[in-house]
Image: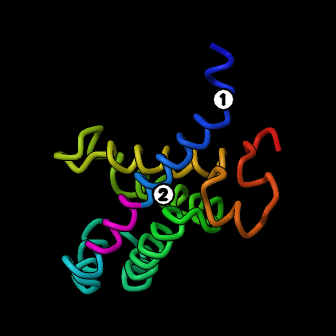
């Protein structure tokens, strides 16, 4: 079992899968805020949810999700963007979604919890070898686990 867990190819594949899935989800949500709901609609929704300074926060969040989603997919500054988006989701969980309970159909936190966990996992484990971070920074840091680095 240890050989399976410590297999570098499997670890690289897992990190790449995490990056592609969570990067896509963040990108899609940012795109939705800009182009489906529009920034004006997102500002109004954030205001109704009680987000302070919604006029400032909404475009920042939407931009972070688009830029960060693309960066995570590419594995570029992965830990920076994953950390920022993980914190953003934790704030959204407590500020907006916690009173709705677990399930998303009641305004709950299941989706933001999953997004937070995925982003923070990427922050901890890094992007892996198949990433622009590994290419540009050419050291093994892109493939090291943060807590062991």
Q: Quadrant of residue 144?
A: top right
> Badge 1 is on which residue?
7
Circles 1 and 2, Cβ within 8 Å, touching? The answer is no
The quarter of the picture where the C terminus appears is top right
Residue in front for this viewpoint, 145 or 94: 145
Q: Residue at x 60, y 43 (%)?
A: 12
- Give percent across and percent down for residue 48: 25, 70
Dominant secondary structure of the residues highlighted in magenta in the image: helix
- Give percent across and percent down for residue 97: 33, 51
Q: Residue at x 29, y 84 (%)?
A: 39
The quarter of the picture where the N terminus appears is top right
- Give percent across and percent down for residue 85: 51, 61
Give the residue at the far top of this rendering. 1
- Give percent across and percent down for residue 93: 41, 51
Mark 2 neighbour class, 10 Å CA radius: few under 14, some 14 to 19, many 20 or more: some
> In the image, is residue 31 part of the stretch drawn in magenta?
yes
Locate residue 37 relative to residue 132 in the image: left or right. left
Magenta part of the protein: which range?
Answer: 24-32
> In the image, is residue 25 part of the stretch drawn in magenta?
yes
The kind of secondary structure element at disc 1 is: loop
Q: Residue at x 48, y 75 (%)?
A: 67
3D distance between C-alphas at marks 1 and 2:
35 Å
User: Which label is found at residue 24?
Assistant: none
Q: Where is 140 relative to 51, above or below? A: above
Locate residue 106 relative to residue 12 in the image: left or right. left
Q: Where is 2 relative to 29, above or below? A: above
Residue in front for this viewpoint, 43 or 14: 14
First reached walking from the N terminus: tag 1 or tag 2? 1
User: Which label is found at residue 91?
Assistant: 2
Q: Quadrant of residue 125?
A: top right
Number of on-image labels: 2
């Amino acid at each position: 079992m240890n050989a399976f867990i410590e297999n570098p190819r499997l670890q690289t594949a897992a990190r790449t899968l995490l990056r592609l899935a969570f990067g896509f989800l963040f990108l899609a949500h940012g795109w939705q805020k800009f182009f489906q709901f529009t920034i004006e609609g997102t500002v109004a929704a954030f205001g109704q949810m009680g987000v302070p300074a919604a006029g400032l926060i909404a475009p920042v969040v939407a931009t972070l999700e688009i830029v960060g989603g693309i960066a995570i997919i590419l594995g570029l500054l992965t830990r920076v963007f994953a950390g920022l988006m993980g914190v953003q989701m934790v704030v959204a969980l407590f500020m907006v979604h916690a009173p709705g309970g677990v399930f998303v159909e009641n305004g709950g936190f299941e989706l933001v919890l999953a997004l937070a966990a995925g982003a923070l996992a990427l922050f901890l484990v890094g992007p892996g070898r198949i990433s622009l971070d590994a290419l540009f920074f050419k050291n093994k840091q892109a493939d090291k686990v943060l807590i062991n680095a």
